[in-house]
């Protein structure tokens, strides 16, 4: 069965490869800020972190699923999104050096929660079928002794600029993290246990997706 990852995230691709799946990669065409703003204005409230990541994961999965269905493709399309919550505020990718430095100064010695949303759509016969989704979360505790020079050096690598929360747990940022409580794959990019449950909910055996053995 064809599996498509609706993401440009190297971390999500790495996770899928580690679990025996080589997916097709298709970048979603989703204006994330516009999607969130539209829903919040429509409902007159701010979305919770769980609602936020689910909304965007669903939007990404459906965008790619609809395009692939028009091509006549069949299989599963996986969309994901992550946000980091600290002091009740949610943070996505910092994008800029100044914002990443500011985030790290606020995070050191603290514990926040990484929220991850997953949506899986099944496509067949030129149409999008069922879509299932789930959220997961893991708490992340940062070392208190991370100094400004270390922050500057880390941010200068560019790694934290395009990842949710401005940190990684599986690369250069790992030395600054003291503890992770919860599914570690959630912090990397998406919960693999959640993905397995969603795939099986669509009537597909998880092991049937292994194509890298």
Image (cartoon, rainbow, N blue to C red):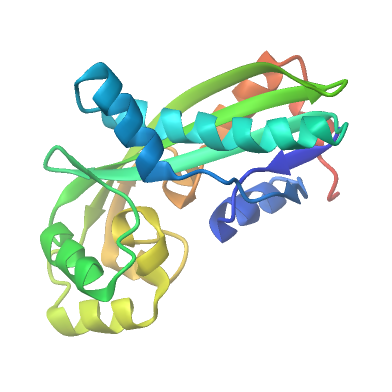
Is residue 50 shown above or below 169? above
Which of 130 and 175 lies nearest the eye of the viewer? 130
Is residue 190 shown above or below 131? below
Is residue 199 shown above or below 36? above
Q: How many marks?
A: 0
Q: Residue 83 occupies which quadrant of the picture?
A: top left
Which of 19 and 4 lies nearest the eye of the viewer? 4
Apparent side of residue 122 relative to residue 175 in the rendered image (left or right) = right
The x and y percentages for residue 103 are 19, 62
Which of 78 and 22 lies nearest the eye of the viewer? 78
The x and y percentages for residue 107 are 16, 58
Apparent side of residue 154 relative to residue 110 in the rendered image (left or right) = right
The x and y percentages for residue 159 are 41, 71
Q: Quadrant of the N terminus?
A: top right
Q: Residue at x 62, y 35 (%)?
A: 63
Q: Residue at x 14, y 53 (%)?
A: 110
Q: Residue 35 occupies which quadrant of the picture?
A: top left
Q: Residue at x 83, y 50 (%)?
A: 212
Q: Residue 95 occupies which quadrant of the picture?
A: bottom left
The x and y percentages for residue 38 are 34, 30
């Amino acid at each position: 069965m064809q599996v498509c990852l609706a993401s440009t995230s190297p971390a999500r691709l790495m996770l899928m490869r580690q679990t025996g799946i080589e997916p097709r990669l298709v970048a979603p065409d989703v204006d994330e800020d516009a999607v969130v703003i539209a829903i919040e204005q429509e409902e007159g409230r701010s979305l919770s972190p769980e609602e936020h990541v689910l909304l965007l994961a669903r939007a990404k999965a459906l965008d790619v699923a609809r395009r692939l269905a028009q091509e006549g493709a069949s299989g599963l399309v996986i969309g994901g999104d992550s946000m980091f919550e600290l002091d009740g505020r949610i943070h996505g990718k910092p994008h800029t050096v100044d914002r990443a430095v500011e985030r790290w100064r606020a995070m050191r010695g603290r514990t926040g929660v990484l929220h991850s949303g997953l949506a899986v759509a099944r496509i067949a016969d030129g149409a999008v079928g069922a879509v299932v989704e789930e959220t997961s979360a893991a708490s992340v505790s940062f070392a208190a002794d991370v100094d400004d020079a270390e922050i500057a050096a880390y941010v200068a690598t560019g790694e934290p600029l395009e990842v949710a929360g401005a940190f990684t747990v599986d690369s250069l940022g790992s030395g600054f993290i003291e503890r992770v409580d919860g599914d570690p794959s959630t912090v990397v990019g998406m919960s693999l246990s959640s993905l397995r449950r969603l795939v099986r909910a669509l009537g597909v055996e998880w092991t049937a997706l292994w194509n890298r053995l």
